[in-house]
Amino acid sequence: MKASGGCLCGAVRYEIDGEPIYAAHCHCRDCQRATGTGHVSVIGLPSAAVKITGETRSHAVTGSSGQPIPRHRCAVCGSLIYSEPASSPGIVNITAGSLDDPSLFKPQAAVFTRDRQAWDHLQGGLMEFETLPPRG
Protein backbone atom coordinates (compact mmCIF):
# COMPACT_ATOMS: atom_id res chain seq x y z
CA MET A 1 0.00 0.00 0.00
CA LYS A 2 1.31 3.39 -0.97
CA ALA A 3 -0.62 6.20 0.67
CA SER A 4 -0.28 9.58 2.28
CA GLY A 5 -2.19 11.62 4.77
CA GLY A 6 -2.04 14.18 7.50
CA CYS A 7 -3.84 16.48 9.84
CA LEU A 8 -6.56 19.05 9.20
CA CYS A 9 -4.18 22.03 8.98
CA GLY A 10 -1.38 20.28 7.04
CA ALA A 11 1.34 20.75 9.68
CA VAL A 12 1.71 16.96 10.10
CA ARG A 13 2.07 14.72 7.07
CA TYR A 14 2.90 11.06 6.59
CA GLU A 15 3.78 8.66 3.80
CA ILE A 16 2.99 4.93 3.89
CA ASP A 17 4.92 2.39 1.86
CA GLY A 18 4.04 -1.07 3.12
CA GLU A 19 1.21 -3.51 3.65
CA PRO A 20 -1.23 -3.17 6.54
CA ILE A 21 -1.09 -5.76 9.30
CA TYR A 22 -4.75 -5.12 10.14
CA ALA A 23 -7.55 -2.61 9.65
CA ALA A 24 -10.20 -2.29 12.32
CA HIS A 25 -12.81 -0.19 14.06
CA CYS A 26 -12.09 0.06 17.80
CA HIS A 27 -15.10 0.70 20.02
CA CYS A 28 -13.29 0.85 23.39
CA ARG A 29 -14.20 3.70 25.74
CA ASP A 30 -10.73 5.24 25.37
CA CYS A 31 -11.17 5.48 21.59
CA GLN A 32 -14.65 6.91 22.05
CA ARG A 33 -13.28 9.62 24.31
CA ALA A 34 -10.25 10.29 22.08
CA THR A 35 -12.44 10.84 19.01
CA GLY A 36 -15.62 12.20 20.57
CA THR A 37 -17.67 9.57 18.75
CA GLY A 38 -18.39 5.84 18.90
CA HIS A 39 -15.13 4.39 17.59
CA VAL A 40 -11.83 5.04 15.87
CA SER A 41 -10.90 3.39 12.58
CA VAL A 42 -7.23 2.45 12.30
CA ILE A 43 -4.78 0.78 9.97
CA GLY A 44 -2.00 -1.09 11.76
CA LEU A 45 1.29 -0.87 9.88
CA PRO A 46 4.91 -1.78 10.54
CA SER A 47 6.65 1.32 11.93
CA ALA A 48 9.25 1.07 9.15
CA ALA A 49 6.47 1.53 6.56
CA VAL A 50 5.43 4.95 7.88
CA LYS A 51 7.35 8.23 7.62
CA ILE A 52 5.83 11.06 9.66
CA THR A 53 6.86 14.72 9.40
CA GLY A 54 5.72 17.63 11.52
CA GLU A 55 5.34 18.19 15.24
CA THR A 56 2.94 16.07 17.25
CA ARG A 57 1.96 16.08 20.89
CA SER A 58 1.10 12.86 22.61
CA HIS A 59 -0.91 11.70 25.55
CA ALA A 60 -0.70 8.11 26.75
CA VAL A 61 -3.59 6.09 28.11
CA THR A 62 -3.32 2.66 29.68
CA GLY A 63 -4.63 0.00 27.32
CA SER A 64 -6.37 -3.26 28.22
CA SER A 65 -2.90 -4.87 28.24
CA GLY A 66 -1.93 -2.63 31.14
CA GLN A 67 0.65 -0.96 28.92
CA PRO A 68 0.62 2.62 27.61
CA ILE A 69 -0.85 3.65 24.28
CA PRO A 70 0.53 7.06 23.28
CA ARG A 71 -1.89 8.88 20.95
CA HIS A 72 -0.26 11.48 18.71
CA ARG A 73 -2.10 14.61 17.60
CA CYS A 74 -1.02 17.55 15.50
CA ALA A 75 0.58 20.15 17.80
CA VAL A 76 -1.20 22.91 15.84
CA CYS A 77 -4.76 21.75 15.09
CA GLY A 78 -5.13 18.75 17.42
CA SER A 79 -6.10 16.18 14.77
CA LEU A 80 -5.61 12.59 15.97
CA ILE A 81 -3.07 11.06 13.55
CA TYR A 82 -1.65 7.86 15.04
CA SER A 83 -0.99 5.74 18.11
CA GLU A 84 1.82 3.39 19.10
CA PRO A 85 0.62 0.72 21.56
CA ALA A 86 3.46 -0.45 23.81
CA SER A 87 1.88 -3.92 23.72
CA SER A 88 2.60 -4.08 19.97
CA PRO A 89 6.15 -2.80 19.48
CA GLY A 90 7.01 -1.90 15.91
CA ILE A 91 3.39 -1.14 14.95
CA VAL A 92 1.86 2.26 14.21
CA ASN A 93 -1.93 2.65 14.11
CA ILE A 94 -2.78 5.34 11.54
CA THR A 95 -6.27 6.84 11.83
CA ALA A 96 -8.18 6.05 8.65
CA GLY A 97 -9.81 9.47 8.54
CA SER A 98 -6.40 11.13 8.23
CA LEU A 99 -5.64 9.37 4.93
CA ASP A 100 -5.68 11.62 1.86
CA ASP A 101 -7.75 8.87 0.24
CA PRO A 102 -9.83 7.32 3.04
CA SER A 103 -11.32 4.82 0.57
CA LEU A 104 -8.05 2.87 0.95
CA PHE A 105 -9.25 1.80 4.40
CA LYS A 106 -10.66 -1.73 4.14
CA PRO A 107 -11.87 -2.74 7.62
CA GLN A 108 -11.54 -6.38 8.60
CA ALA A 109 -12.85 -6.35 12.16
CA ALA A 110 -14.57 -4.48 14.94
CA VAL A 111 -12.85 -4.76 18.32
CA PHE A 112 -14.00 -4.01 21.86
CA THR A 113 -17.59 -4.48 20.76
CA ARG A 114 -18.51 -4.97 24.44
CA ASP A 115 -18.15 -1.17 24.70
CA ARG A 116 -19.91 -0.35 21.41
CA GLN A 117 -22.70 2.19 21.69
CA ALA A 118 -26.15 1.13 20.49
CA TRP A 119 -26.15 4.06 18.05
CA ASP A 120 -22.79 3.12 16.47
CA HIS A 121 -23.28 0.05 14.30
CA LEU A 122 -21.22 -0.15 11.13
CA GLN A 123 -21.39 -2.23 7.97
CA GLY A 124 -22.08 -5.91 8.48
CA GLY A 125 -19.82 -8.80 7.62
CA LEU A 126 -16.87 -7.80 9.79
CA MET A 127 -15.30 -10.14 12.31
CA GLU A 128 -16.32 -8.92 15.76
CA PHE A 129 -14.44 -9.32 19.02
CA GLU A 130 -15.62 -8.32 22.50
CA THR A 131 -12.03 -7.30 23.31
CA LEU A 132 -8.91 -7.81 21.21
CA PRO A 133 -8.63 -10.90 19.03
CA PRO A 134 -6.21 -13.60 20.12
CA ARG A 135 -2.68 -13.13 18.81
CA GLY A 136 -1.09 -15.66 16.62
Image (cartoon, grey):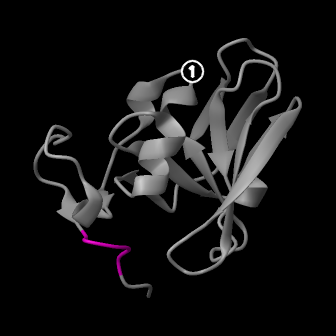
**Can you give x and y, in whole percent of width and height, for residue 109 in the image?**
29, 58
Q: In this view, does 132 lie to the left or right of 88?
A: left
Question: Which contiguous range is marked in magenta?
Answer: 129-133
Kindly identify the residue that appears in the image at 75 percent across and 14 percent down: 10
Q: Is residue 41 visible?
A: no
Compared to 5, does 115 lie above or below? below
Q: Name the residue under label 1.
A: 100
Kindly identify the residue that appears in the image at 55 percent across and 80 percent down: 65
**Can you give x and y, in whole percent of width and height, for residue 118 in the image?**
13, 45
Compared to 35, does 31 lie above or below? below
Quadrant the N terminus occupies = top right
In depth, the one of 15 and 30 nearer the eye is: 30
**How many discs mark residues in the rendered view?**
1
Q: Is residue 4 visible?
A: yes
The main secondary structure of the magenta stretch is loop
Q: In this view, does 33 lie to the left or right of 57?
A: left
Compared to 23, does 2 lie above or below? above
